[in-house]
Image (cartoon, grey):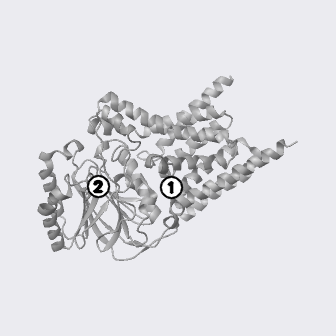
Amino acid sequence: MRFINRVHRDLFALLAGIFYTLAFAPVDFGILALVALVLLFASWRCASPMRAALRGYLFGLASFGLGIPWVYVSLHHYGFVPPLQAAGITALCIGFFALFPGLAGWLAVKSGGNKDWMLVPLLWVLVEYVRGAVFLNGFPWLLAAYSQLQTPLSGYIPLLGAYGTGFLLALTASLAVHFLCSPPARVMVAGLATAIGLLGWGLQSVQWTQPVGEPISAVMIQGNISQDQKWLPEKRLETLRLYKEMTEQNWGVDVIIWPETAIPAYLSQVDEHFLQPLRALALQHGTDLVVSLPVEGEIEDHLYNAVLTLGQTRGLYKKNHLLPFGEYMPLQPFSGWVLKNLHIAMGDFTPGGDRQPLLQAGGHAFIASICYEAAFGDAALHGLPAAAYLINVTNDAWFGDSWQPHQHLQIASMRALETGRYMLRSTNTGITAVIDPHGRVVASAPAFTTTTLKAEITPMGGMTPYAHWGDRPVVAVLLGIFLGVLGRSRYVLWRAHRP
């Protein structure tokens, strides 16, 4: 019977992983993230360190297995990696990221904190931070807080960001477990969990930022160029003609935005004959253009993924937070040797630096992010409060009709809410969207269509509390609380066993 109970708890952890991923886009049933963490934390409560690690790992296998199979789509359908190799690499990615909740479970029991209502959520979010921001440049997909954009906990996002809000979600789950397992403390834990929800609900009505000017009219162009056609030399003129014609149909608006690498050529190849005449037309019609293309650096072999503004001012932003194994190769020379022997070609870009000057369009400065950069809260803070809005350009064509574009849009929505600013998001195949300062998608274009999305946004000024301090101070405070609580519990244990 004991063996059966143990196996049942293992299966609960696996089921919890499925529930967890269903809390995110496109299913968006946010309450399931709380249910999932309750099941997971309860499964750790009476487990050995290795059993807790196993259950955390099963949770991770289920959550990432359901949440990121689009890795296979990218590798096989558009990276032309053979099916077995693509499936193997996808399985390795899922298995690797599943190690993080496994680590959280092992640490929870090893530290003696698996029955402590405070230590478990602290460990959970600290391990999330290592995965999301530290290891291999960070992989912040399926961070707990992203599932809470439509729940009362979203009120904490402009205050504490993704990791602080994720801690409060995990704390609520831990309190629910404590409520079920510790009857004498039920009144206290129920009151605390209720207070967390009510305060978050109240914070949703706080206006952290304010309008600073007249509305800006904008058009985002969704070219819908298939990834397997995008870089073919014989398709280049057709692509440039498409974007130019769609732009000319919308002259007169304040800003027109093209998606990531909409121009399938280096800047030096198209500047004189295509971009400079296009800028002259933009000036003539009073429109600022925001386009994207690769740029060759002054140093040999330095290549950048960039955003270029054409209009009243000409400026260049070079992508800084690169995608590991997609735009640069970490763990060299080992990773390069592996991919070379598997005959897998990956990008080799250079980061642009984190202190680049802000770009201008529509009469205001804006913060630019390119694709993967939208997944990092700190990356959207440089330039505040001077920036009046956000622009994100991306090319999710790499992932086809999978869950990835929906997850990516959800992640981008967090950046708008954290900064209290509108985001204009232009994508190649979808989901092109406008996100308001409350993190709500107020307009979007249908995916896999060649279309434009017209919008009017208000420039915003001021700073949210999160914009003042970012992720690191929040995580440092949580780490300090963890060490304090751990030290207290160890001291109490020592006093109890002192002769």
The answer to whether 208 appears left or right of 43 in the picture is: left
The image shows residue 116, relative to residue 5, as above or below, that is: below
Residue 156 lies in quadrant: bottom right
Q: Which mark is residue 162?
A: 1
Please state the horizontal and vertical placement of residue 180, each as a whole percent of the image: 69, 42
Residue type highlighted by circle 1: Ala
The residue tagged 2 is 304
Q: Earlier in the sequence, mark 2 or mark 1?
A: 1
Quadrant showing the C terminus: top right
Quadrant showing the N terminus: top right
Marks counted in the figure total 2
Please state the horizontal and vertical placement of residue 310, each as a whole percent of the image: 22, 67
Residue extending furthest toward the bottom: 213
Q: Is residue 65 visible?
A: no
Q: Is residue 451 visible?
A: yes
Using the numbered discs, state the Cα–Cα distance from disc 2 to disc 1 in whole angstroms. Answer: 28 Å
Please state the horizontal and vertical placement of residue 30, each as a whole percent of the image: 50, 48
Residue 282 lies in quadrant: bottom left
Name the secondary structure under disc 1: helix
Residue at 15% x, 73% y: name it.
Answer: 284
Of residues 7 and 50, the one drawn nearer to the viewer in this rendering? 50
The answer to whether 59 appears left or right of 292 in the picture is: right
Of residues 472 and 258, the one drawn nearer to the viewer in this rendering? 472
Of residues 482 and 32, the one drawn nearer to the viewer in this rendering? 482
The answer to whether 309 appears left or right of 36 in the picture is: left
Residue at 75% x, 46% y: name it.
Answer: 490
Of residues 271 and 263, the one drawn nearer to the viewer in this rendering? 271
The image shows residue 294, relative to residue 12, as above or below, that is: below
The image shows residue 157, relative to residue 323, as above or below, that is: below
Residue type highlighted by circle 2: Tyr
